[in-house]
Image: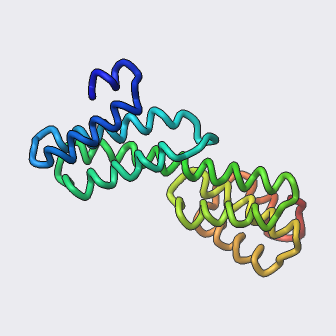
Amino acid sequence: AESEFQSGQLVEAAHDFRQAADQYPSSPYAPLALLRAGDANLRMWRDPELDPSHGQEALALYQDLAGRFPESEAAGRAQLHVHELRDWFAEKSYKNGLFYYKRGAYDSAIIYFKDVIANYPETPSAADALVRLAATYRAINYHDELQETCAHLRRFYPQAAGLDKVCPETGAATP
């Protein structure tokens, strides 16, 4: 499996690493095999804008690793990749929302922005999603939702780029 990984045969490597971990769960190599299976899937997802299937598989493998071998060094290393994946999932959802926002499909944009805020609040995309959500509410005249979103932004993301433009302290601004 390691040879396949190093030679770029990532699909085969992921399969063989997973198989090794499942067939020999008591082996000291099992946690590392799960880590490497996740790593192979992570490498196959090169860009957050592309199909996230390999990223989702990598995340599932890292979570399996953390569940089966929580005290292992491999589980600790996997957590770094989990944070990277969560950032990428948030970025993907944010860019989907931005796509719809720019085309005036505000209801769809709201769904994606809220997904980022609800599922990935610790990521850099969360503040951007809240700013765009506020801009969306402003564009469709949802005043109560705008006030609530602006209050949330000011409380939790006071340094967010574009905050003062979309949520002015006094007066009205355009998105």
Please provide percent x and percent y for residue 132. 75, 59
Q: Quadrant of the N terminus?
A: top left
| Residue nearest the observer in this picture, 47 or 20 | 20
Examine the rendering and report whether any part of residue 46 can be seen: yes
132 on left or right of 160 = right
Asked whether the viewer can see residue 168, the reply is: no
Nearest the eye: 118 or 2: 2
| x 65%, y 66%: residue | 114
Q: Quadrant of residue 151?
A: bottom right
Tell me which colouring the rendered structure shows: rainbow
Q: Quadrant of the C terminus?
A: bottom right
Q: Is residue 81 left or right of residue 122?
A: left
Left/right of residue 131 with respect to residue 40 in the rendered view: right
Image coordinates of residue 10 in percent, x first then y, are 40, 29
The residue that appears at 57% across and 50% down in the rendered structure is 124
Q: Position of residue 38 (x, y in %)?
A: 36, 41
